[in-house]
Amino acid sequence: MIEDIETIDEFLAHRAADVEDAIRKAAAAEIMPRFRQLSADEIDQKSGPHDLVTDADRLAEKYLTEALTALLPGSVVVGEEAVHADPTTYEAIGGTAPVWIVDPVDGTRQFVHGDPGFCTLVALVLDGVVHASWTYAPARGEFATAIRGRGAVLDGVPLRSGSPEPGRDLDIATSHPDYTTDEQKRALLGLWTEGVVPRPCGSAGLEYLSIARGELDAVAFSWEAAWDHAAGLLLVEEAGGAHLTLSGEPFRVTGGNALPFTAARDEATARRVTALLTAQPEWVAARA
């Protein structure tokens, strides 16, 4: 646990730049040297052909685990690859110690195919609350950070999500069908309606960044793995956006959310999207 003399806020005031430095170094050491240089034996499947892991994922997570826990003694890391190896590791998110939630390469499929649309995601959580987040897209040279109550920035420039232009169709990124149950697929069909332009999502972290910078109106996602969402949801919040689950409550990184959920440029858009997710479109109902 953090020593009594240092709160999370004090840690962030003094060491947030060190966290950013550790993330940049992890990417420089373990990710970018393998970008467009991967051999077949450095790539494995996890749950299926769309769920890939590479040596870059594993080694970057190892690097960050060592670096981040050294920066904040008593903290623990919940990383995507560590949880894949031992699912009980995920339980630390609900514990009392500060937790670093890490996705070493968010968008591994893009990374494997030589597409620059991937990023490294890190969030610092205490008592189920995300206090800070870092989103680094090394192939694009972009670094976004958010600290609760202090705003969000992209390469030092404040981010403001704004609101969708009245009367314009909403651009929404949605879950890949491979990661949705039949019930969730039916909910997502609510987005196939007039005034909405849905498309499959890429890297979740970069979709959240697109919302925070006002380029994408919303996302609608059907899974709740914290490493995909913790960093981006705080980024959206601090840029002025909002997130809601089907129960009408904000998304909880500790789990138990009513899915699918949305994050959007403003609260009105978030509520509009959740309403669509709970309303079956007429053309589906007619076929029932």
Image (cartoon, rainbow, N blue to C red):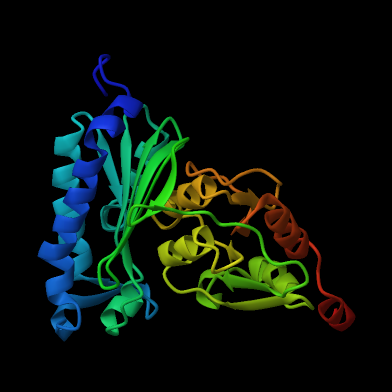
- Viewer-side residue, 9 vs 273: 9
Numbered circles on residues, count: 0
- Viewer-side residue, 139 vs 121: 139
Q: Position of residue 113 (x, y in %)?
A: 29, 85
Please say if 163 is above or below 196.
above
* Image-quadrant location for residue 168: bottom right
Measuring 30% from the left and 25% from the top, which residue is drawn there? Answer: 10
**265 horizontally vs 281: left or right:** left
Q: Position of residue 129 (x, y in %)?
A: 46, 35
Tell me the quarter of the image containing the C terminus.
bottom right
- Viewer-side residue, 238 vs 174: 238
Q: Position of residue 63 (x, y in %)?
A: 14, 53
Extreme residue in the top direction:
4
**186 horizontally vs 155: left or right:** right
Extreme residue in the front direction:
157
Please say if 70 is above or below 284.
above
Tell me the quarter of the image containing the N terminus.
top left
Please say if 102 is above or below 282.
above
Measuring 54% from the left and 69% from the top, which residue is drawn there? Answer: 215
**49 horizontally vs 18: left or right:** right
- Viewer-side residue, 64 vs 241: 241
